[in-house]
Amino acid sequence: MSEKADKRIEEQARREYEEAYNFDSSDPLFGLRKEELRGPRMTRRAVMRLLAAAGALAFTDVLAACAPSAPPAQEGEAAPAEAPAAAAGGALVCGWAGTNEIVTLDPAQINQVLQFQIASNVLSGLTHINADLTAEGDLATDWSVSDDGLEWTFTLRQGVTFHNGDPFTADDVLYTFERSSNPELSIHSGVLVNVAGVEKIDDYTVKFVLNKPQASFLVKTLERSSGRAMTIVNKRAIEEDGPERFGLFPIGTGPFKVTENLVGQSLVIEKFEDYYDPERPKLDKITFIPIPEPEPLAAAIEAGDIQLIGGNPPAAELIDRFLANPDLVVSEIPGPGFQSMWFNPHRDPMKVEDFNKPLEELKQESGFLVRLAIAKAVDREDYIKRAAFGRGFPAFGSINPAMAYFFDTEINETSEQTYDPEAAQQLMADAGFPGGEGFPTLKLLITPAGKREGEIIADILKKNLGITIELDIKDFPVLVEMYDAIDFDLLRIGSGGDYDPDDGLVDYFLTTAKFNGPKRDPSLPFGIFSEAEVDALIEEQRSETDLEKRRELVRKANKLTSDKVACLFLNHPVDTVIYRKEVTYPDVSRIAGLVDLDRATITA
Amino acid sequence: MTQFLIRRILVSIVVIWAVATLVFFMLRIVPGDPIGAMLADVDPAAAEALRAKLGLDQPAYVQYFRWMLNTLRGDLGNSIYGNNQPVNQIIAEALPRTLSLSFFAMIIALAISFTAGIVSAMKKGTWLDHIVTFVAILGLSMPNFWLGIMLIIIFAVNLHWLPAIGYSPMSDGFWPWLSHLILPAIAVGAPFAAIIARMIRSAMLEVSREDYIRTARSKGLSARSVIFTHTLRNALIPVITVMGIAFALLMTGAVVVENVFAIKGLGRVMIQSILNRDYPVVQGAILIVSLVFVATNLLVDILYTVVDPRIRY
């Protein structure tokens, strides 16, 4: 694609994106006409508006939706031409990267992206959003909304059967709601707190009543895959087989059914002959093999043993190799999340007793100067090049580029953490450690998998500040215990799947956050970070309905956590899918975070 | 012999019980919380509820007796992780993979080591002996995961002769089963082939200096008869000991290779469950492995009497 065309698409995306956020937040229908919110299909405009109102619209989603073909390949590299769509039939083998096993497929228990990527091929929801950001009825053929935005009435698809032969009716929607809203049965019950009830009008009509208008209801709660809360399950299967077996062999109404599940070895799904759409799925059989090690994963796709890589993002060091291979297609888009290094504020020499002091006052304290010096001494570009093989984006806060609207594009220059080695050295000297002299050796708590990254951080800090960092490598469960108890000098952790500003702020930076030292010594006044203004801003943005105001609150909170060095922010990740060119993976299926294979084909 | 067997079996039961008990309590001393590892981002109340449901809130001795009772009934409990799969099932799935791999690796190791060992003993000091020694040292020095990756690159990626990863059960056909095992079995078996080959060589050289070999030669027996009937047979005792240990080690030591070839065998089950602090699975897997160790040792002792009739229990 030419540069000019790229520019045009970007401009169009920017226009659509801004338009999506431009509405009166007090309107129960989010500035949309009632007709626009009706089924059986919602336009991109309506979906984007709902996603925006839900705080879940990423600029990259819009960009991908505007692009005429597959997401653009990496700059400077031509994406190999895809094979023309093959005839239906055939078997596909997928490698699921970076995991030992696909633990569960029960939507009530799914807590990893790599699980719902598969579940989305087996189970259905009432609606489904495609990559071009249009919402289609999945198990609903039509729907309408009341004027106050509180009552949603759905007409259900008739003639749909579950994999076990049971017919799909309104009772299944009611059962799914009952199960998913029970916190003892589902870990996603919180998603349904705004639903006051579900009513069966007749066998093929249901009505949801909400407590207050909720934009994410149609695009998240009812969405078949990522929502999970209202992914339709089969009552008889759960009651007869028990939840354990259901987690291995979930019975749904999706395009594929699970026929074999050897946890940790392989998972097989096969075409469901009675799927409601006779045109789909195309493939007869798909096998998923968890492949934990990067080198065998690469060898397997190069040898053609597997034809597609999904699951966790494959190791960054492999991507250049894949890009250079004419047999492979690499699709990369910004991923939501952040990677970081945390300081123990209760230990010398990075001790800070009160983050509430104004920044200038904090800068008089040796402990704060040390934190700031370390944060300023790390060149993010260099770190990403060495630790993530160039795959990632510099981070100066938890709000990431995938949440484009909230992302602060200038924070790399305005944050106190901006890379400046000379200033960092001066700060160290001001803290009483000129050239790192007299600075104690600090231990960096890290998992075995993070060893390489830890060594790179240690190397950068040795070079720029003359200080010594030793790695304290612990298995994940031990790391979690030490983390919860605030028993470390430095800690290397990160977060993934942060699509909404809430995800990036609430879990880490609130004084009462679940990760903020829940098992610490009770004499410690707070865990890793506590700042009254940040607390107030986070709380305020959660209930702020005016998006522009919310954006300001989010950016302010983000900037404060960065300036006051709640942690050293390192990088934001990349979302990647790789497949062999004999696979056709239509653009409409390239949904961020998902690997929908119902339209995929393969040539023999 | 019968008395010996009965005594050995009784001792074995005590050994297995001791190992199981030791592992049970060691697991609870090792830092790390299974619930914490599983529910890193779920609220503490849910974690407590789950702890109670799984009985992890009980004192260790209560948990121990409960586990012992269930184990005696043949029920190894359920995994703490994921779908709470029964441990019996996890092991029943992984064991055939590990056994297939271990048997096949053993066959490869024995085929290579016997040929190499006998040839190098017979041709002691010649270039052939030096080459065999060199290759054996090479086999010993190569880390098996590296060898595994090299084999994948050569035979799967470049030559397309064999599959790169995965496992196919024998029920899906003999060739798929075999073809998936060849590369990992070579990777696992190579170091053992090297050890056993060196062992056979030195044992044969030692035996060949014995009086009875000289007698056999002076009787005018053929060289083949002297080597296979007299020298090799008498050189087998230390070799069988090593083979027994090697087989038992293969059962658990293949974890790195299992990871490389994406095969979920017993080794991977153990490592994964230790990392997750999935107590019931660790306990169950170690119980099975200690059973295999003890059974292999017993088999080795019995084999001694077959090879050397002078040995009587």
Image: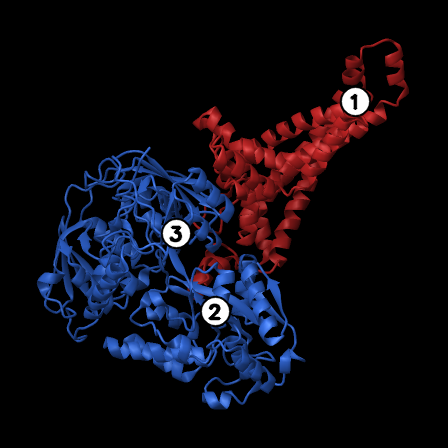
Chain colours: A blue, B red
Q: Position of residue A562 (x, y in %)?
A: 44, 77
Image quarter in which the N terminus of chain A is found:
bottom left
How crowded is the residue under tag 2: few (<14 C-alpha within 10 Å), some, or many (20+)? Answer: many
Q: Decide if residue B284 is on the left or right side of residue A402.
A: right
Label whose residue precedes the other's in the sequence (2 or 3): 3
Q: Position of residue B138 (x, y in %)?
A: 69, 38
Which is in the foreground here, disc 2 or disc 3? 2
What residue do we see at 31% from left, 72% from top? Answer: A406
Q: Secondary structure at mark 3?
A: helix
Residue A179 position (above or below residue A304):
below
What residue is disc 2 on?
A380
Q: Which mark is residue A298?
A: none
Q: Amino acid at mark 3?
A: Leu
Q: Are marks 3 and 1 on the same chain?
A: no
Question: The numbered mark 3 sits on a residue in which chain?
Answer: A
User: Label 2 vs label 3: CA separation?
Assistant: 28 Å
Q: Which mark is residue A114?
A: 3
Q: Amino acid at mark 2?
A: Arg
What residue do we see at 16% from left, 41% from top? Answer: A159
Question: The numbered mark 1 sits on a residue in which chain?
Answer: B
Q: Are marks 2 and 3 on the same chain?
A: yes
Determine which quarter of the picture holds residue A287.
top left
User: Label 3 vs label 1: CA separation?
Assistant: 57 Å
What residue is disc 1 on?
B122
User: Label 1 vs label 2: CA separation?
Assistant: 63 Å
How crowded is the residue under tag 3: few (<14 C-alpha within 10 Å), some, or many (20+)? Answer: many
